[in-house]
Image (spheres, rainbow, N blue to C red):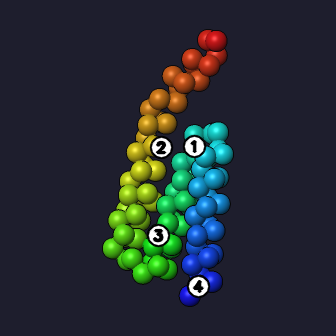
Amino acid sequence: MIVLQIVAFTAVVVLGVAVVACHDPLRQVMVNGLFGLSLVVLFTVIQAPDVAISVAVVSTVAYPMLLLATIYRTGGRLEKRRSDR
């Protein structure tokens, strides 16, 4: 069980750093979804299934959907601002 906890904590740390390191918003949303999934695994391993279910719904489904919709709706304007500079 300790080995699973170490692997889960390591995955959370690595994916957390990867979310921060991504500069492309679309790629950051996808990596953030994987980060949420790693949190679900971590909370399941440390025997907190209620928190794991909450994290699964929010960080793996709802949050990426909202971010993708926002990027889709504002993406054209962002590119236009960059070309005007």
Q: Amino acid at mark 2?
A: Leu
> Which numbered disc, 2 or 1, marks the residue that appears first in the sequence?
1
Residue 3 pos. (x, y %): 63, 83
> Which numbered disc, 3 or 2, marks the residue that appears first in the sequence?
3
Separation of marks 1 and 4 at Cα, in angstroms: 34 Å
Q: Amino acid at mark 3?
A: Val
Q: Determine the residue positioned at 63% across, 53% down.
A: 17
Task: Determine crowd level at label 2: few under 14, some 14-19, many 20+ residues with C-alpha closer than 10 A.
Answer: some
> Which numbered disc, 1 or 3, marks the residue that appears first in the sequence?
1
Mark 1 or 4, which is nearer the eye? 4
Against 62, residue 50 (above or below) is below
Q: Mark 4 near mark 2, Cβ–Cβ under 8 Å?
A: no
Residue 39 pos. (x, y %): 49, 66
Mark 3 or 4, which is nearer the eye? 4
Q: Which mark is residue 68?
A: 2
Q: Amino acid at mark 1?
A: Leu
Residue that label 4 marks: 2
> Which numbered disc, 4 or 2, marks the residue that appears first in the sequence?
4
Q: Which mark is residue 40?
A: 3
The quarter of the rendered structure image containing the N terminus is bottom right
Badge 2 marks a residue whose secondary structure is helix
Residue that label 1 marks: 26
Task: Count the labels in the image.
Answer: 4
The quarter of the rendered structure image containing the C terminus is top right
Task: Determine crowd level at label 4: few under 14, some 14-19, many 20+ residues with C-alpha closer than 10 A.
Answer: few
Mark 3 or 2, which is nearer the eye? 3
Q: Amino acid at mark 4?
A: Ile
